[in-house]
Amino acid sequence: MIKCSVCKHLNPAGAKVCANCGVVLTSGSLNASGMLELRVMGEDNAVVRIHAPNVEGCVLGRSDNKSDYEPDVDFVNFQAREKGVSRRHAVLVSYRQVVHVIDLSSINGTFLNGARITPEVPYPLSNGDQLSLANLHLVVAKAPN
Ligand SMILES: [Zn+2]
C-alpha cells in the first residue's frame, strides 16, 4: 500500500497517482519540474495548478484595487485579504532543482507545516507539505503531467 501524502488515502502498491485526490504518489523533495498543485484547504477546497517555478520564482499573493500590482498566483478570490495575505507574500523558487518557499517579509507570516518560517530564507518543500500564507492554508503537491 502507498499512503498519499496529501489526503492519506491508501493506494495499492505500484500506483502512480492517488485514486482519491489525483496527486502524484511520491514523498520527499518536490522537484522543480512539471506541474504543481496548490490546494486551498477549507471551504474553498479549490486546486490551483502552476508550472514548477524556475530560478526567478513565482510570487504568491493577492491583487487589490488600490494598486496595479498582480502576483503570479493571485489568491484574491479566496478571501486572501481577510485572511491576512500580503500583496507580495511569498515566492516559490527552484534552488538546486528543488522547490523552495521564501517569505517576502510578509506582515502576517508564512508557515510551513504549522511553524513560522524566517523571512527571506529559502525552505525546501516536500510533496504534501502544508503551506500557510497567514490564515490561507494550502497543500503543495506534485500534479500528474
Ligand atoms: Zn490523495
Image: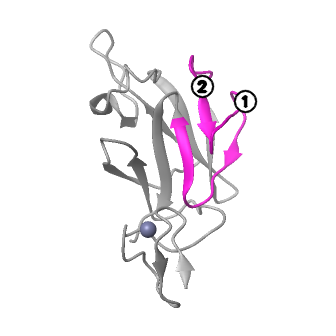
Question: Where is residue 28 shown, x and y percent of the image?
Answer: 66, 66
Q: Tell me the amino acid under the disc marked 2.
A: Gly
Q: Which residue is mark 1?
A: 118
Please tell me which residue lies in front, 9 or 39: 9
Instruction: Give the magenta part as a residue range.
Output: 105-132
Query: Residue 71, can we see it?
Result: yes
Q: Tell me the amino acid under the disc marked 1.
A: Thr
Above or below — where is 98 with respect to 10? above
Looking at the image, residue 42 sits to the left or right of residue 123; the answer is left
Above or below — where is 77 with respect to 17? above
Question: Where is residue 89 shown, x and y percent of the image?
Answer: 51, 27
Distance Cα–Cα, label 1 vs label 2: 9 Å
Q: Residue at x 50, y 67 (%)?
A: 8
Ligand 1 is found in which quarter of the picture? bottom left
How is the protein colored in the picture? one colour
Above or below — where is 28 with respect to 114? below
Q: Which residue is mark 2?
A: 109
Corner quadrant of residue 127: bottom right
Above or below — where is 133 with respect to 113? above
